[in-house]
Image (cartoon, rainbow, N blue to C red):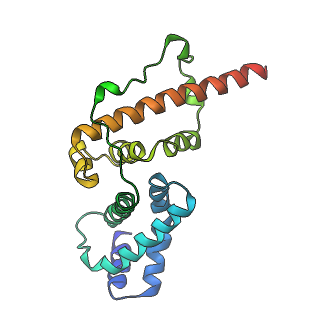
């Protein structure tokens, strides 16, 4: 399989349209999921997907078969999303960690183990509903495994701001997961 994929990439480097179509078919679904994580909506994710593939095929000669092609491509899509983000939105930075207070009170806690009832779609929606600056940092740190130093370099923010935005994103998500879980539990009990 690796040999076949290597051959397809080499053919792409020569401008072979069928090879480009094969690469697109192999990666489009995974890369679209990446684009969705960094977009406001489906249309924006589709634009990012198209832009990312244009970049892949114009820069494919830079891929040297060191590491996975999918990983190389993924970085292109993430970088496109970050570039678009930086050009469209001025982030409101939060440097004061003390201002971030999203602690749950005792009555906000849900039943033990109830979070398992949330679907992946529910969780992704909650992440996508985060304010953009928090969503970007959360995605980069939690889903893309970047360090705060890497995030700060890519977004042009301080490491403290990255940490603060991640803390705030987690606080918002924790509160929303608890609220959504309580709603699900309430509906289940009401239907009994």
184 vs 16, nearest the viewer:
184
Image quadrant where residue 84 sits? bottom left
121 vs 149, nearest the viewer:
149
Q: Where is residue 191 in the image (x, y as percent from the top left)?
A: 79, 23
Most distant residue in the top direction: 106
Q: Tell me: residue 25, above or below residue 20.
A: above
Q: Which quadrant is the C terminus positioned in?
A: top right
Q: Position of residue 42 (x, y in %)?
A: 56, 59
Which residue appears at 72% of the width and 25% of the height? 187
137 vs 19, nearest the viewer:
137
Which residue appears at 33% of the width and 88% of the height? 14
Left or right, 64 with respect to 78, comes to left
Q: Which quadrant is the N terminus positioned in?
A: bottom left
Image quadrant where residue 163 sits? top left
Most distant residue in the right direction: 192
2 vs 92, nearest the viewer:
92
Which residue appears at 34% of the width and 62% of the height? 83
How many numbered callouts? 0
Image quadrant where residue 111 sits? top right
Q: Where is residue 22 in the image (x, y as percent from the top left)?
A: 47, 77
Left or right, 83 with respect to 47, comes to left
Left or right, 1 with respect to 159, comes to right
Which residue appears at 58% of the width and 40% of the height? 122
Q: Tell me: residue 113, above or below residue 165.
A: above
Q: Where is residue 95 in the image (x, y as percent from the top left)?
A: 27, 35
């Amino acid at each position: 399989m690796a040999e076949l994929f290597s051959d397809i990439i080499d053919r792409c480097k020569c401008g072979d349209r069928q090879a480009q179509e094969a690469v697109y078919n192999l990666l489009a679904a995974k890369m679209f999921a990446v684009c969705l994580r960094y977009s406001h909506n489906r249309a924006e994710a589709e634009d990012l997907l198209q832009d990312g593939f244009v970049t892949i095929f114009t820069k494919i000669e830079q891929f040297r078969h060191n590491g996975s092609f999918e990983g190389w491509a993924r970085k292109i899509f993430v970088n496109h999303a970050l570039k678009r983000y930086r050009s469209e939105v001025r982030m409101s930075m939060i440097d004061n960690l003390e201002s971030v207070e999203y602690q749950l009170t005792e009555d906000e806690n849900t039943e033990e183990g109830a979070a398992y009832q949330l679907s992946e779609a529910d969780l992704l929606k909650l992440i996508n509903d985060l304010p953009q600056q928090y969503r970007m940092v959360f995605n980069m740190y939690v889903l893309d495994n970047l360090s705060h130093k890497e995030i700060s370099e890519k977004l042009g923010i301080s490491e403290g701001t990255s940490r603060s935005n991640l803390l705030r994103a987690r606080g918002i998500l924790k509160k929303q997961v608890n609220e959504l879980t309580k709603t699900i539990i309430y509906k289940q009990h009401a239907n009994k």
